[in-house]
Amino acid sequence: MPKRPDNEGHAGWDDYAPFYDWENARTLGRRDIPFWRSIALEAGGPVLELGCGTGRIATPLGRAGVRLIGIDRSSSMLTIARRRVARARLGKRVSLVRGDIRAIPFPDSAFPAVLAPYGVLQSLLRERDLAAALASAHRVLPTGGLLGVELVADLPSWAEYEKRVSLKGWRDRPGGSHVTLVETVRQDRARHLTIFDQEFTERRGKRRHARRFALTFRTLSVPQMARRLEKAGFEVTALRGDYRGGPWSPTAEAWIILSRRRPCDTR
């Protein structure tokens, strides 16, 4: 029997860190970066990125002139991000902090914009944890400040499958290591969770090393998340269905919600 996910959605992300960029280069690529870059530049001040991971978004935004602080709970992800920021010589523009997005460790109204890309809020598996993260984001934004949230598209209807070879290819370059991802997807409908059981096998010459872990996401639709944002004191201003700013629909390639903090007395 597969292991039931625990209530801490950060489980698995330290194990995922060495393969995160490799997988994303073959799936999402850089398609989302111009979208977040445009929002961050328009904000005109320091931007906070929730769940900054390996710096996949933070680094190109920093190169574009954005002052950004990234927060993540995974020390392994942040180790990679810090190396990336150092190589790009962005230490004066991009800061990385290990912390919990349910209790953001910054002053009130510190950021004109908070970004939550790529399903990061869905890694909060309990309703109270999501509520805490939204309340924390509300606190560090001024009235009118922007919160941008991206959900994993079509997660509620994601097909289940077992031990499928999802990706394979060279890591870094031919002559390095070869990686194969075997994946099982489970839907826990009762708990509103989608679980991705991952097995990454890395082969270098005759040596093989396998790493197994699970990543779990809350199965939330755009209307469900929009209602939670409204309850947390935000006004939803736009729903986007792609990274070019197109309108959202349930079959859209991207699920993005843009909202603004309402004044506290109207919550």
Image (cartoon, rainbow, N blue to C red):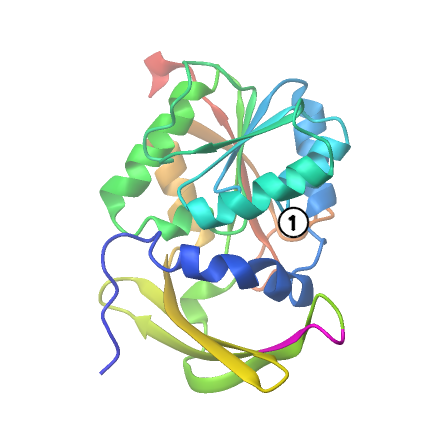
The residue wearing badge 1 is 247
Note whether residue 196 is visible. Answer: no
User: Residue 265 vs residue 247: left or right?
Assistant: left
Outermost residue toward the front in this view: 206
Residue interval drawn in magenta? 174-179
How far from the left and from the top, in percent, is residue 186?
A: 35, 75
Task: Name which residue lies at 43% across and 49% down.
Answer: 223
User: Residue 222 vs residue 190: left or right?
Assistant: right
Task: Name which residue lies at 38% across and 60% down.
Answer: 12
**Compared to 243, does 27 lie above or below?**
below
**Compared to 232, does 241 lie above or below?**
below
Mark 1 neighbour density, 10 Å: few (under 14) some (14–19) many (20 or more) = some
Image quadrant for the N terminus? bottom left
Task: Name which residue lies at 71% across and 40% down.
Answer: 87
Q: Secondary structure at mark 1?
A: loop
Note whether residue 175 is visible. Answer: yes
How far from the left and from the top, in percent, is residue 80?
A: 57, 48
How far from the left and from the top, in percent, is residue 24?
A: 62, 61
On whether residue 22 falls in the magenta region, the answer is no
